[in-house]
Image (spheres, rainbow, N blue to C red):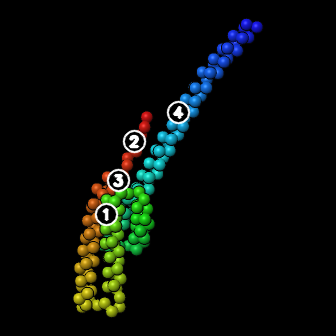
Amino acid sequence: MEALSTAKQVIDIFSALLSPVIAISVGFIAYQQWKLNVDKEKRESNSNKLHIYIVVKRFLRSVDINHVVDDKLYEELQEALALADFYFDGIVTDWLFQVDSDASAWLNLMRINSLPDMQESNPEFTRNLREIEELIDNLQNFHCELFDVFKGSMMYLKTSK
């Protein structure tokens, strides 16, 4: 009978010790899950930022090479700019707004100059051509600034050990 009582006491002691161990284990697992989710959110954010960077780079590279604003790439740029407001600070979004403004102005001036009543002898036509050239120069300069503008806003995910 006494042996049964001793066995019950040992089982009670192990039960009492097991509860905190289980609680600590559950807390540790919860902490690891939280850490994984934070890292996942950072990776997703970086992935979206990188996508925006690539779209802007593709657009500006096209302008730099072809000296025209491609309509399809401009539409992709518009979509990327809509996302950029959610992922970047004011420095990047202000810079992107300037890129968009110059590209939009270029498209507008090209449409105006392609109207049937616009002729090369028209002073507005030649003034628009000069402005178009300036806008292409600006967009080429934006291509040179691209990496420096974006690198400050990109978070580099360090591996945790």
Amino acid type of disc 4?
Phe
Name the amino acid type tagged 3: Ser
Element type at mark 4: helix
Mark 2 or mark 4, whichever is nearer to me:
4
> Mark 3 — residue?
153
Query: Which residue does the numbered mark 1 point to in the structure image?
Result: 95
Residue 118: % across, % down: 31, 90
> Callout 3: helix, strand or loop?
loop
Q: Which residue is mark 2?
A: 158
Q: Residues within 10 Å of mark 4 (few under 14, many from 20)?
A: few
The residue at 63%/17% (across/down) is: 13
Do callouts 2 and 3 mark residues in contact (Cβ within 8 Å)? Answer: no
- Marks 2 and 1 sit apart, C-alpha to C-alpha, by 28 Å
Separation of residues labelled 4 and 1 (CA atoms): 44 Å
C-alpha span from label 2 to label 3: 15 Å
How far apart in space, not on screen, are marks 2 and 4 (Cα)? 21 Å
Give the crowd class for mark 3: few <14, some 14-19, many >=20 residues within 10 Å.
some
Residue depicted at 54% across the width and 33% down the height:
27
The C terminus lies in quadrant: top left
Q: Could you tell me how far apart the alpha carbons at marks 3 and 4 are, in whole angstroms?
A: 32 Å
